[in-house]
Image (tube, helix red, strand yellow):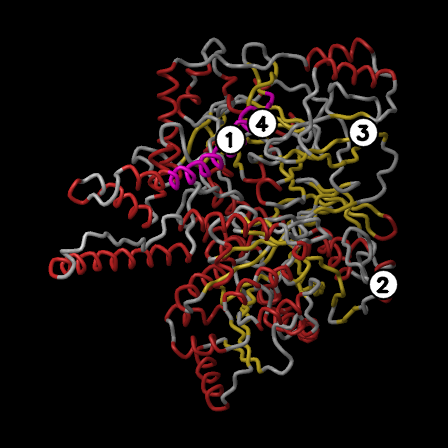
Amino acid sequence: MINYQTARRKLNRRRSSVFIPEQPSILQKMTHIISNAAQTFSTRYGLHHATNTAERIVIPNYQVDYTIQRCKLYNYQTYCGNKIKTTKYGLITFIPKNLWEQFHRIANLYFILIAAMNWIPVLEAVDPYLPMLPVLIVFGLTALKDAYSDFCRGKLDRQVNRSFCHVWDREENRFRKMHWEDVIVGDFLHISLNEIIPADILLIRSSDPDGNCFLETSNLDGETSLKPRYVPPSLLEHSGEEILHHPVDFCTKISCEKPNNRIYQMKGYIIRNNKITETISSENMLLRGCQLRNTAFIEGIVLYAGSETKVMMSSSDPSYKRSSLEVATNCFILHCILILISMCLLTGIASIFWLSSYLSNIRKTLIPLSLYISVEFIKLFQIYFISQDITMYDAYRDRVTECRSLNIPEELGCIQYIMSDKTGTLTENLMMFRGCAIGGVNYTCEPRPGDSGNLRVDNVMVNSELKDRVEVMNWHTDRILMDFFITMALCNTIVVNTKSHVERGLIKNDILDVDHDMKIEQNRVAGYSKILRDTEMWNLTKKVYFDKWSFLTRWSKFARKSSTEMNRWKRNEDYKELVYEGESADELALAYAARAYGIKLLKRSKQRVVLILPQNNNQAFDILRLLPFDSTRKKMSIIVRMNDEITLYCKGADSEILNSLSDCKSKQSITVQLTKEILKAYSMQGLRTLCLAKRHLTLTEYEQWMMKHTEIENNVGSLTYEKELHQSFASIESNLEFLGVTAVEDKLQDGVEDTIVNLRKAGIQIWLLTGDKMETAVNIARSCGLFPPTSTVYMLNTEDDVHEAHKQILTHNNLNYCIVLSSDVLFLFVKQDSKFLHILQRSISVLCHRMTPSNKAKIVRIAKEVLHGGVLAIGDGANDVPMIQCADVGIGVYGQEGLQVNCSMDSNVGAKKNLVQKERARKVIK
């Protein structure tokens, strides 16, 4: 039972007042603001001074004498503070900035000119005050609308800046509560469970003894899956709840790169005694806006603050995006002005000879004054009706269609080309394991009736013959079979939990500490949660004391969220259910499949992975190195050590794995030849395939490679860094031993076929851009109706294929055909080859396979320039962001991993079938 005095002491500690640092003088504050603004501008636009180095050195503030005021610290005076400002205007800059934007509209300039001319006696047509009134009304209404929008943005800024975190106080030697806006670079922070990270910090300590912590990055990239982060190995001794740690124990400096917007990259060093002791990477960084999950607490040092954090650097300045309608309107008005000037000149000259004796004045307005303001109100109503359209509501995800750009909805009536991603857009991105091939033998199962496709339960298609083999396999007689399933369970970045997104403990010495293990059930509570007063917290503490088995409610207020979570705590009685959370659905499908066959992923940390093998034998693997997946290599590898045996396990695209096999296991191998036939069969069924392989390494081989690889990683400033890094990966991912192939199914979304048919009837050409291999992509295109059954399909892989297809189309006058493109013929797009463009424009649909994110963006950009039509891009993943940003209209689809393209889209929908409703405007216009 909780001791009464203990609970009271904890409560008093929580009652400590907010730590407000001594404020600098007005002159110091103005100097700091100007310096920060100049530094932020130069950092964002790359205007560094010649004397600047490529790195910054951060000295923790607790190493400085506490008698020095914070406002006089080097980190305060040199680096940007943590206060953010996303508003477009200021009190002084509002009028000039807003007028500058409104002057971009030619009609506004025209009416200002007319009003000014009326003040010239010779040119006066009416009372000078009369033309000024409507002009001021139009300008005033537009300014009020912009001011209100900016005020709402500033209100959110103030909420974020006034949020609380705990910062180490040098004078009192303890953590104290402080506002986010008062945090500076070099501060030592304590982040508790469920708190949001206030700045970009280097992870120094974790409550987990292994130095792990988990982040939810939905505020950063839209993904709701947990991401692991790790304490640098040299600092692991400080991790663990039971370890007493003092920041002074970490006496060092940190060298890191200049602020940039590369969210998934980080290069830096930990320096001790003027020597580099260890490199740091993105795996050691906790970025602003992420939320700490499944970890009682972490502590770290601020490296970037405020506008220099990666999330703020990656967000563009508020800009005014003009639609083609507004551009056309400006052009028409300019023509009207020229016509009006011509009419005035001609009639003025003619009046000398014809109308000089007439006194009546005949005048008529040629350009309507209320044109733009009327259009603005029409857009507002249009956006409102789109968001309220019940036919576009996604009941499954409880999502409505949102329009995030005021000037883009009318573009929907001008769309001629739709560039669509496949995974998560046409398909559900719910991968189901459908079979595998091991040793040239195919093991598949037919889908069961009523398959729900839920990866969170074990409804994996299990082949009984393979299941029997796995149950009796051992290391000596079935090594290939064993390694195959070990690769499936091991080669990933999956986080193992006992329940999805469940916290499994309280912060040590927290006021809600109970002498029993706890877990959370999360319920959504609409609106912001109120902040408990001290008396309410005390009543809550007494409730814990007198009835520790009652439900305890803890309120938290998170910045920039319209809803918060009420966490209810209760006794933990069952940890038997293992739930996997990964960055991709493919990883989850393979891990759950391996578990269904008896090889279970039990635990994962940065240093070790534990698997449960058949006969319930636990096997631990020490992780030596993880080579992450990238779109260039199209592979992922993990190097592990088990019983003094070092092995590299690798998975990737068949085109890459098969070309990396050793000579004795190369294309001449019967197993590989049989597997190629199976791969072709899988592709014909529209299944996604991955090849698995391994390589045994001697200790000497690994140490030699690791020494060279470490040298490359330390040379982060080199111009050839990326090239050398990929060469290092290629050297170790060679001479592989082939293990087998996996096949997973990605189900089509409901209503996709009807949507494609209706869009085609509206005269819109659909392009499918995917990274899949050609056979898989073609079969998906046929199954979703992108390629009609009666159409002819032309494969264009070379320039000769283009000429041959063009000849056949002209000879047979064929208009019922579809095109399949590879990245190898994109150069014809750039060259604007007439035959190539003729084929594309007359085709029913176009499929582009083996596309990287940059390829997708290039196609969208060139299509806008060459095909001369409105382009709409739609996708759900982070790899779709480049093409969405290039398109005239960008649409994000809510996927299984959240909305990763949240910051880049003009609107978002629950599913692609809702595009039919959005395209009705096109039919009306036509």
Mark 2 sits on what residue? 469
Does residue 333 appear left or right of residue 73 in this picture?
Answer: left
Q: Nearer the viewer, residue 196 or 492?
A: 196
First reached walking from the N terminus: tag 2 or tag 4: 4
First reached walking from the N terminus: tag 3 or tag 2: 2
Q: Nearer the viewer, residue 780 or 563?
A: 563
Residue type beneath disc 4: Gly
Asked if residue 683 shows in the view, the reply is yes
Q: How far apart are labels 2 and 4 at the CA level?
A: 49 Å
Mark 3 sits on what residue? 569
Residue type beneath disc 2: Arg
Q: How far apart are labels 1 and 3 at the CA level?
A: 39 Å
Mark 4 sits on what residue? 300
- Residue 158 drawn in magenta: yes
Mark 1 sits on what residue? 270
Q: Residue 868 location in percent, x, y?
A: 41, 67
- The reply to whether discs 4 and 1 touch (Cβ–Cβ < 8 Å) is no
